[in-house]
Amino acid sequence: MGQHGRIAEHAVRRIREDGLEPADAWAVMAAELYAETPGLQDRGCARAAFLGLCAAGKVRGVAASDCAEPGKDQAYALRALEILQEDLTLAHDQDTLWRHVLDGRTIRHNAQMDVVCTLFRAGMLAAD
């Protein structure tokens, strides 16, 4: 699990246990887990992927909401989830998963796959 996957997993727990809104849970956990590393707290792509999964109702125990505007990071996260449901082994290979998400395009992921894979392996994402 990478740093942003760790933030996401703990944020889901805070949403479920304390009733925090997804954006607040992310901010609280990022600040708590990485107080000495502000750059990790502000990683927008990972945060947007997390909020996108929450908004789409894909996180178990988190109601779908309007906590995120649809965007490319949400689309990447949702596509990754679809692919993982077809090939579970990719949950342990973020780079290959990312290549499948991009379908031939060549850009680097910014921790979106860490968020998706961590939550998927933890059983926190809902299957369709």
Image (tube, rainbow, N blue to C red):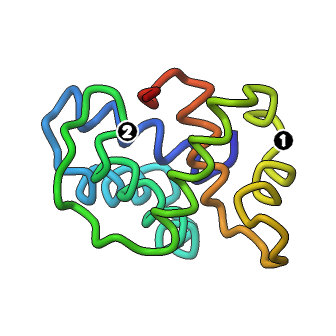
Report which quarter residue 107 is drawn in: bottom right
Image position, residue 90 (x, y; %): 79, 36
Amino acid at dot 1: Asp
Q: Residue at x 27, y 59 (%)?
A: 23
The residue under label 1 is: 93
User: Relative to the observer, which residue lies in front, 104 or 44?
Assistant: 104
- Please tell me whether mark 2 sits on a helix, a strand or a loop: loop
Where 76 sits versus 104, above or below? above
- Callout 2 touching callout 1 (CB < 8 Å): no
Image position, residue 81 (x, y; %): 57, 42
Q: Residues within 10 Å of mark 2 (few under 14, many from 20)?
A: many
Residue reaching furthest top?
123
Amino acid at dot 2: Lys
Q: Residues within 10 Å of mark 1 (few under 14, many from 20)?
A: few
User: Relative to the observer, which residue lies in front, 26 or 123?
Assistant: 123
Q: Is residue 47 left or right of residue 82?
A: left
Residue reaching furthest left?
19
Q: Is residue 83 left or right of residue 29?
A: right
Q: Residue at x 53, y 71 (%)?
A: 45
Image position, residue 88 (x, y; %): 73, 26
The residue under label 2 is: 58
Where 105 sits versus 93, above or below? below
Q: Residue at x 23, y 57 (%)?
A: 24
User: Relative to the observer, which residue lies in front, 41 or 127?
Assistant: 127
Report which quarter residue 47 is drawn in: bottom left
